[in-house]
Amino acid sequence: MTAGGIRVERLNAWFGDKQALRDISINIEGYHTTAIIGPSGCGKSTFVRCLNRMHEVNPMARATGRVFIGNTDIYENGTTPVEVRRRVGMVFQKPNPFPTMSIYDNVAAGLKLNGWERGRRLGDAVEQALRRAALWDEVKDDLKKKSGASLSGGQQQRLCIARALAVEPEVLLMDEPASALDPMATAKIEDLLFELKQSVTVVIVTHNMQQAARVAEFTGFFLMGALIEFDRTEQMFTKPRDKRTEDYVTGRFG
Amino acid sequence: MNAMPKFQFAEQRALAPVAVLKPKRVVHPRSSRFADPCFRVGMAGCSVSLLVIVGLILLELLTHSQMSVHRFGWQFFVGTNWNPVSGEFGALPFIYGTLVSSLLALVIAVPLALGSALFITELCPKQLRSTVSFLLELLAAIPSVIYGLWGIFVLAPLLRQYAEPWLADHFGWTGLFDGPPFGIGMLAAGIILAIMIIPIIGSIAREVVLAVPSSQREGVLALGATRWETVRLAILRNARTGILGGVILGLGRALGETIAVTMVIGNTPQISSSLLAPGYSLASVIANEFSEATGDLYLSALFEIGLALFLITLIVNALARLLVWSVTRGMPARANV
Amino acid sequence: MKREKGISLGRKLRNHMAMGAVIISALLVIASLITILAYLAVRGAGSLNWAFFTHLPRPIGESGSGMANAIAGSGMILLIASAIGMPVGIGSGVFLAEYGRNRFGNFLRFTADVLNGVPSIVIGITAYSLVVVTQKHFSALAGGLALAIIMVPTISRSTEEMLLMVPHSVREAALGLGIPRWRTTVSVLLPAATSGIVTGLMLGFARVAGETAPLLFTALGNQFWNWKPGHPTAALPLQIYTYALSPFDEWHRMAWAGALVLILLIVGTVAVVRLVTARSVYRVTV
């Protein structure tokens, strides 16, 4: 396993009695972007939410298996979900900035509320995070004056990315981050993924295969809770090994 | 071989990273593992305190009423003689007073509350809606001592001088209006209670009426019904259970109301068929006699009355909540009226 | 034979009568509200003067009698009640919203409803036997405790409602950053729900400010100043009650004045709260 990567061994997940993931085993390459694709309901969101133990937030949810980030199994007994989520960040489908906080406070939230940074160092961290999210130039004059919710959709999502980056996670999970945005905003977000992977491992869920091709070196194809195929994107989209993958990529279903 | 769609691939675009810049990971202090469980327990404690309080109330009432329960048994609730001096404690006059004043209040309040609710939802012009609702809410905010004050000095004289003689003249044949018009008495208590419970019944009725899907309304209108027929067929029929729940909630409030009733009911432990006669209620006897109660048996009897009041209002309110819950929970979001 | 189109006269008449009845009920209800407020204003204003707010009660016949101690006493009792009832109520609301979406939570919610429906006189005698008897004297503390007990279910319900209105996506965002649950609630959710929670607090306060029955056997009342929470204390609603039932005209006048002050405080609070939240979706039912 490369440095910064994720190794998943036999991950199974349930919602109550319904099994959502079946025996997933996968090695996600560190400091690269991996896309997770598949039709609706195939378990791609569930899979990604198991990587930062957000799956458990639902009281009916359960997961078994091992997920190694670095040398630690995030599911082992001694590790709390809170610790995991500080190493694995997440950006959600619909931008969700904190409604009562300014842009500055939004980005600083992870650092401030975990008690990690303060004062000038906090300001520096906020600026760095906003630069990495390609939002700094647009908001640098209104940091504390404007609320997070007053930005446009695309800007809000980059704000959420900055907020996630501020705590310097090793992995950044993105659950269909651009599906609620217009094409221009989407392009901006795709562009910044190229810079991001210099320092963060990115896993992105998407239903848009063109997007997967544009941004990800690796892709995993999920169907009905199982991992059907995992390969370099170019390989999977030109010469898929499994017939189901080929059907999906050519648009036969999903 | 199927033709694969054309893609623009990442690796064709991106520059291969030459040296991967891994940022220096700052080691942050681990968070306390006890903070979350402690917080949860603390908040749970606040919530559980509700249970503790109800438990304590029940405990105190049961403990202190034991003496009276042992002495009188069931006779307590059928005895008509309340004589602290001779040690006889029969609570029937209070039960009678509480029931009659509350039922009288319902008879007056339900039509008025329902009418007001329907006015707000059906007839009121949209701009006035929130004002009228607000006025109803103000009625609910008036403290009971002020209702009592108004009852003694405004309502009672009016009843004594005008209303009660008129009622005795025209409806005396019913036997409900015998005896001299004092002004204060069962009728005054019933009227004051009615005004106090109208907002409760009205606001629940309004909620329940608004929860009736407009498809029901439209269906009946499409058949050519008048406004009133639409209300009767589409709304009242569907909202029946919820409105009943609101009525029972109002009843619960009326049964337990103390201060306003004490000030106008006349505080005489007697059972009379006349609405003009003074009476006494369960809550009033406690309010009036608790601090004067000499002797353990007297106090215990009052505690037993308190216990009875607690249990009656508990059952009535639980029933009401059940009815309202069953109707409004299944319904879609309500309009802001 | 031609089918008669249109609505029969009988139906039209019933419709008009019904609509008329509806309008009359609404008018009667509003009229009773206006009547009560009008009498308060007229009879109360006449007796309100500077002495009312600054002087102690004086023997009948002497001028310059006031209810200052009752106003101050109410203030102290309400302060004690709020200090106990508001934190406990908010805590309970937090628990039910964040950790109580299950059967246990439903049971606690039901208990809160039960407590809400207990007649205030019963709470009064319970506070008497729990606090006054053990301490062997009446006190503002006992009165404050009784009022706090009445406050808690109301505040718990409104706090819970407001917290539930904060979208789940906000919780997810905070948890996703690795912020622990307790910090999320305290630093993200409660601030987001603040205005609604404060509204709930004010309405809970307004409700207990006018309560008399719980104070009858706890705070008891006092003809003089008292600043010690462990001693019997005067309260505005209590004083109004005592004066109204007395045989003296002068005390009756003071009762009206006191009632006017009380109603201005309470109705004023409710009016301000409603006007401020008029445009929001927030709505707490009885």
Image: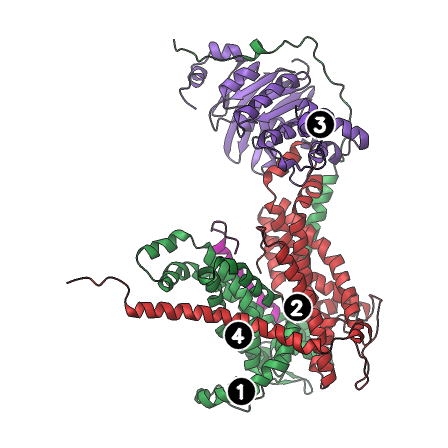
Chain colours: A purple, B green, C red
The residue labelled by disc 3 is A166
Point out the image quarter for the N terminus of chain C.
Answer: bottom left
Amino acid type at mark 1: Tyr
Q: Is residue B183 visible?
A: yes
Q: Nearer the viewer, mark 1 or mark 2?
A: 1
Q: Residues within 10 Å of mark 4 (few under 14, many from 20)?
A: many
Image: magenta residue range: B308-337
Secondary element under disc 4, as helix, strand or loop, is helix
Give the amino acid at mark 4.
Ala
Q: Name the residue carrying label 1.
A: B162
Single out the mark in the foreground, 3 or 1: 1
Image point (59%, 41%), residue name? C167
Which of labels 3 and 4 is toward the front?
A: 3
Quarter of the figure with residue B262: bottom right
**Residue matched to label 2:** C120
Which of the 4 image quadrants contains residue B256? bottom right
Q: Chain of mark 1?
A: B
Q: Name the residue carrying label 4.
A: B105
